[in-house]
């Protein structure tokens, strides 16, 4: 990457060197290879139809922790036709190819889809399952949310539109977008820009939590 240690990534509340960021991302890809293959590797890119594999793949990211997974999967499967039209109006263009105004125009559409998913029994209360499912359908523009990511962005009480805008600002800040594009991910499928950001933040927070417990 060339002089990576001299360049910095601007995280919410602090900065780290490019070289450290690359190490963190590689650690995720090495230590969570099965999850990446089963979640990201089975995602064929932006699509409108909720497929069986979309619901099954959420298991790879522990989205169903705390419940019998068939219960929310069956509930969402029965409501798929209510969600899919809301997904269809969200752009399939990559986040980084859109202007700030164009991204902002997508926020209410994404919120509407997330809200409809959360109306499904077993998908409300926290946002993790809804975000991980919608990211499967629109990985180009929908960021993932879970408890570790929430620690960077104000917790689970933050409204969806505010969270989306906060992530979009983060990814565009400083040299962040350039860094995310530059990281080598030698896989036979795409790891989208917003997923790369999720990997970076999630793994760093995971490492810090693990170190604190020692």
Image (cartoon, grey):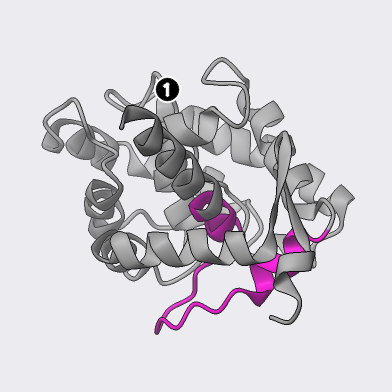
The percent coordinates of residue 34 (x first, y second) are 24, 64
**Residue 129 can be seen in this image:** no
Magenta segment includes 188: yes
Give the left or right position of residue 30, taking residue 4 as reference: left
Q: Nearer the viewer, residue 17 or 51?
A: 17
The percent coordinates of residue 77 (x first, y second) are 25, 42
Q: Secondary structure at mark 1?
A: loop
Q: Nearer the viewer, residue 68 or 196?
A: 196
| Residue at (60% x, 60% y) in the render | 21
Give the left or right position of residue 137, taking residue 65 as reference: right
Magenta segment includes 194: yes
State whether residue 107 is above or below residue 137. Answer: above
**Which residue position holds label 1?**
126
Please state, as top left, top right, bottom left or bottom right, where the C terminus lies in the image.
top left
Q: Which residues are magenta?
A: 175-199
The percent coordinates of residue 186 (x first, y second) are 45, 83
Give the left or right position of residue 47, taking residue 141 as reference: left
Mark 1 neighbour class, 10 Å CA radius: few under 14, some 14 to 19, many 20 or more: some
The percent coordinates of residue 175 (x first, y second) are 81, 61
**Residue 209 can be seen in this image:** yes
Give the left or right position of residue 200, taking residue 166 as reference: left
């Amino acid at each position: 990457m060339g002089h990576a240690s001299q360049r910095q990534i601007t995280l919410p509340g602090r900065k780290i060197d490019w070289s450290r960021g690359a190490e963190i991302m590689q650690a995720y890809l090495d230590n969570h290879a099965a999850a990446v293959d089963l979640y990201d590797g089975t995602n064929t890119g932006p699509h409108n139809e909720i497929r069986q594999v979309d619901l099954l793949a959420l298991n790879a990211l522990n989205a169903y922790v705390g419940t019998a997974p068939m219960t929310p999967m069956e509930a969402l499967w029965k409501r798929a036709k209510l969600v899919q039209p809301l997904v269809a109006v969200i752009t399939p263009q990559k986040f980084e190819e859109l202007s700030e105004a164009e991204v902002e125009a997508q926020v209410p559409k994404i919120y509407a889809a997330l809200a409809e998913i959360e109306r499904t029994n077993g998908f409300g209360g926290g946002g993790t399952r809804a975000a991980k499912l919608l990211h499967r359908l629109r990985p180009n523009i929908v960021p993932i949310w879970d408890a570790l990511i929430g620690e960077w962005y104000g917790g689970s009480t933050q409204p969806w539109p505010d969270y989306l805008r906060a992530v979009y600002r983060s990814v565009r800040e400083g040299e962040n977008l350039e860094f995310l594009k530059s990281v080598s991910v030698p896989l036979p499928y795409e790891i989208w820009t917003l997923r790369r950001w999720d990997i970076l933040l999630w793994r760093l927070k995971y490492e810090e939590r693990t170190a604190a417990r020692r």
